[in-house]
Amino acid sequence: SRSKWAKIRRKLSEIPANKESLEVIDTALFVLCLDDIETPSITECMRNTLHGTTSLTSSDDFETGTCISRWYDKMQLVVSANGVAGVVWEHSKWDGHTVLRLFSDVMTDSFVKFAQSISGKSKVKTHVQSIRVDPEDLESLNIHLLPRKLKFDLNKKAKSELKLCTTAISKQIKSLQSLVLEYDAYGSTLIKSNGFSPDAFVQLAMICTFYTVKGFLPNQYEAVMTKAFKNGRTEAGRAATLPALDWCRAFDNPDIGDEEKIELLKVATKAHSAMTRRCSKGEGVDRHLYGLKCLWQKQREDKLPDLFDSPGYKKLGVSTMSTSNCGNPALRCFGFGPVTEAGVGIGYMIREYDINFTITSWEVNLETFREELAGYLNQVLYLMKKYHELQKVNGEDNSDSLPSKPKKRELLGETLR
């Protein structure tokens, strides 16, 4: 846990050699992790980036997995032996879109330099301006350019505590399930052409899948950016609206017609979009109430108001399903761990012709969840086709917003494969 590591770190920093090594790490921009294993599949790459591998068994004394080649206090660039790279960081310092901007610029710059090597610098505009630094300035700043081994002076107690930490993380890695669903039947182009917000559409897909698998509506969290405000980070969007519940109940109900189902989905997605717009304008619920709670605890000594001890507020603070949208062509997948033991964590990316989900959980069967999520998306595609057929029969629809799969493949080619 953070508090346990804070105590261990405080003790380590009391020794001069350790303090110097910790300072070098703390002042670095990021940590580069060069792993000696290959990650051929997208799921293996995601797992190795998120938490590394573990080799510990009941008879092993030493961990040799890649999980020991990490420093989670820093942003880390993880590169496997076959050249697959990923980025992992501790969420309290940065939000996903902040890190995404950094590595999007890095990727863009690499493409620009490649283009310049073909067409020349005069024809391709430079994306990032290089700044030359005088070596003497580096010496005065005490910056070392050559790699060197950092030394740590560890006593018997420190080694014992670190070994316990290694065992604990090994158990967590083994118990955490994680899967990637690369759904390529359709993406944002088709969703938007049918009058839905892509993000709201996918949020309803995830919450309805959970409802199908577990039988109840989860308290679903969506990270909503509040970057319009100075120092703004996120607000908690809550997808569990009454229209969402109506849609989840109707989805598998054979007594409700296809046209009515699509109309219910439209109502639910519009309600979700309205909720996220309020959150982005600072009109959410979670952050406001949490801020009031913190102020009360800081400025007063008497008991918290009953609101903060109510069943509703306690339930609000447990995000059974935590989700975040971080789509960008610079990434192939994006994910994180669940925030509750019985919950699910989903990072998703909505692209033009496909949707990527990275799903994690300790308790929910993810094979079943992934199968149900893909089945839901296929079923809604069928409903949209039936809806358009009914609209055309009634003379209400002259659009062709559901291109056949061969046409989609022709448009897409192999550029994203």
Image: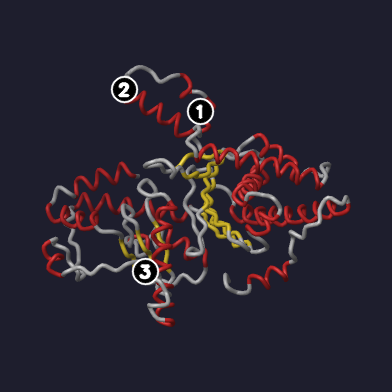
Query: How far is disc 3 from disc 1 in space, using C-alphas?
Result: 44 Å
SS assignment at label 1:
helix
Q: Amino acid at mark 1?
A: Tyr
Residue bearing the label numbered 2: 299
Residue bearing the label numbered 1: 313
Badge 1: residue crowd in 10 Å (few <14, some 14–19, many ≥20): some
Badge 3: residue crowd in 10 Å (few <14, some 14–19, many ≥20): some
Badge 2: residue crowd in 10 Å (few <14, some 14–19, many ≥20): few
Residue at screen point 50% across, 40% down: 280
Residue at screen point 32% across, 20% down: 300
Query: How far is disc 2 from disc 3 in space, using C-alphas?
Result: 48 Å
Q: Return the disc, 2 or 1, that comes first in the chain's sequence.
A: 2
Query: How far is disc 2 from disc 1 in space, using C-alphas?
Result: 21 Å
**Is 57 on the left or on the right of 222, as rendered?**
left
Q: Return the disc, 3 or 1, that comes first in the chain's sequence.
A: 3
| Residue that lies at the very extreme toward the front in this rendered image | 122
Q: Are marks 2 and 1 in contact (CB under 8 Å)?
A: no
Residue bearing the label numbered 3: 35
Q: Return the disc, 2 or 3, that comes first in the chain's sequence.
A: 3
**Is 52 on the left or on the right of 271, as rendered?**
left
Q: Amino acid at mark 3?
A: Asp
Q: Quadrant of residue 132?
A: bottom left
Residue closest to the eye, 270 or 37: 270
SS assignment at label 3:
loop
Q: Amino acid at mark 2?
A: Gln
Q: Quadrant of residue 120?
A: bottom left
